[in-house]
Amino acid sequence: MNGTPAGKAKPNVVDRDRACLWHPYAPASDTLPLWEVVDAQGATLTLRGHSSDTPAKAHHVLDAMSSWWSVIHGYRNPLLDAAAKRQLASFSHVMFGGLTHQPAVELAERLTAMAPSSPDRPALERVFLADSGSVSVEVALKLAVQYQSAVGRPGRQKFLALRGGYHGDTTGAMSVCDPVDGMHSAFQGLLAKNVFAPRPPAVPADAEAILQWRQAVETLAAENENELAAIIAEPILQGAGGMFAYPAECLSILREIADRHGLLLILDEIATGFGRTGEMFAAEHAGVVPDIMCVGKALTGGYLTLAAMLCTGDIARTVSKQGAGALLHGPTFMANPLACSVANASLSILDGGAWREDVARIEYGLANGLATARSLNAVKDVRTIGAVGVIELAHDVDVPAITRAAIGHGVWIRPFRNLVYTMPPYITRSAEIEQITAGMVAAVAEVHGAP
Ligand SMILES: *Cc1c(COP(=O)(O)O)cnc(C)c1O
């Protein structure tokens, strides 16, 4: 394909990759197309291909995935670049045991100041900085169990989770992911047995559907009360479990049920946090304040891996009084200064407030641009919530074919199951949003049949 005789060709990056690397949710000898990224700027990635599936010319594509929800301010953002360089010039990493630093303290202060709050609930005022979203979920689960034990209920070691949920790939996190559709059936014997409530009704939902769901959750909570430490849920929008939006009222119901049965409410805002759904945190759509909250993904604007778990002062004090008095977790790269510095720069951009108009503008563009997909036979549903747009097909997507077709239209997407979706960077311009939606609709039409 490159015009070089096969025998003489130097192995390219993709061939070398295939010889020694894993990719997410993939076999080691994966043969699906793989692109090399050679540059990224703003909302645009420059890809280079190395095989007949992935032609070698430079492809400039709009990153409709924000690199899995994270790159909200775009690539090579000058403020984030500068923050990283400033921190590099002093130190990139130090251990967090017995040491502290300005970037971590500033980040914890920022997070507690911006977290969901309400006059009649305890504030989220204590922060544990973890190195990935899954780890922050592990810490949240452990904290809930330690809390229940500290208040004299050591038998409460299980969780009430929602079907359709996704909370990460580590063992504890897997145990609260959807037990059927999740990828975790292979690990049945390894995973803690938790309690699963039905998925809430989809929006728009009628009062009757919400009432039925409430009764189902209430019954499960009542029946299992003495074994349950907490309820865990993704607020308003279930992400990797199906890009599924549910009514804000259902979140308020989870808050009520948690309170009635002495359960903590853990909200996993790893995908939804930092403006993606139109509020800074998705819990704010319902005015709900959790007892424990996890954030990650967009925390550093997609520059570095970092996550955080926040909890109320009461939980922190209660756990710290009992027994060893410690929260039993401590990653090597906890509070990495480079990541914290970039996170502070990202949060300071969000403080500027432009994200709110950007997300509203993108939501409008996605709703408009994706509407035409409704007329395609293969399409079951089209929905938007904040800067997230979803085309749901009636059957599974041909992922390599759709990806290739979208690249032909200058758009990078990574569908899964029956979902072709986008959550573009907030800096994506309106004309670029049009290109993304047109590319998604055209790719679906080309691969899965015209109207
Ligand atoms: C991505 C995600 C996680 C896991 O985060 P990682 O950083 O990939 O470990 C957990 N919960 C939700 C809701 C997510 O979207």
Image (cartoon, rainbow, N blue to C red):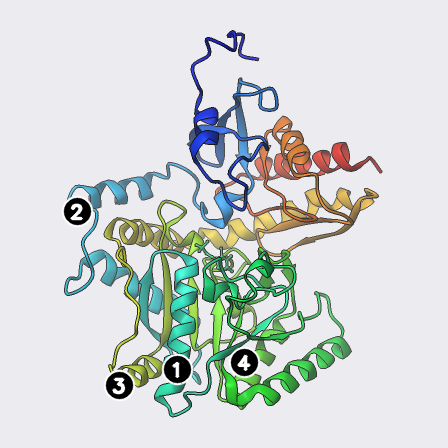
- Of tags 4 and 1, which is closer to the observer? 4
Question: Is the CB of the residue bearing disc 2 within 8 angstroms of ligand 1?
Answer: no
Residue 264 placement (x, y as % from top left): 46, 81
Report the front residue among 244 and 30. Answer: 30
What's under tag 3, amino acid-wise?
Answer: Gly
Query: Residues under labels 4 and 2: Cα distance?
Result: 42 Å
SS state under label 4: helix
Does residue 310 appear anywhere in the picture? Answer: yes
Question: Is the CB of the residue bearing disc 3 within 8 angstroms of ligand 1?
Answer: no
Residue 310 placement (x, y as % from top left): 37, 70
| First-in-chain label (3 vs 2) | 2
Q: Are marks 3 and 2 in contact (CB under 8 Å)?
A: no
What's under tag 4, amino acid-wise?
Answer: Arg
Query: Residues under labels 1 and 2: Cα distance?
Result: 36 Å
**Quarter containing the N terminus:** top right
Query: Residues under labels 3 and 4: Cα distance?
Result: 29 Å
| First-in-chain label (3 vs 4) | 4
Read off the residue under disc 1. Answer: 122
| First-in-chain label (4 vs 1) | 1
SS state under label 1: loop
State the residue at coordinates (28%, 54%). 340
State the residue at coordinates (59%, 35%). 431
SS state under label 3: loop
- Of tags 1 and 3, which is closer to the observer? 3
Report the front residue among 84 and 268. Answer: 268
As drawn, the label of residue 255 is 4
State the residue at coordinates (64%, 30%). 404
What's under tag 1, amino acid-wise?
Answer: Pro
Report the front residue among 67 and 137. Answer: 137
What crowding class fits label 2: few (fewer than 14 Cα within 10 Å), some (14-19), or many (20 or more)? few
Image position of 33 (left or right of 319): right
Read off the residue under disc 2. Answer: 91
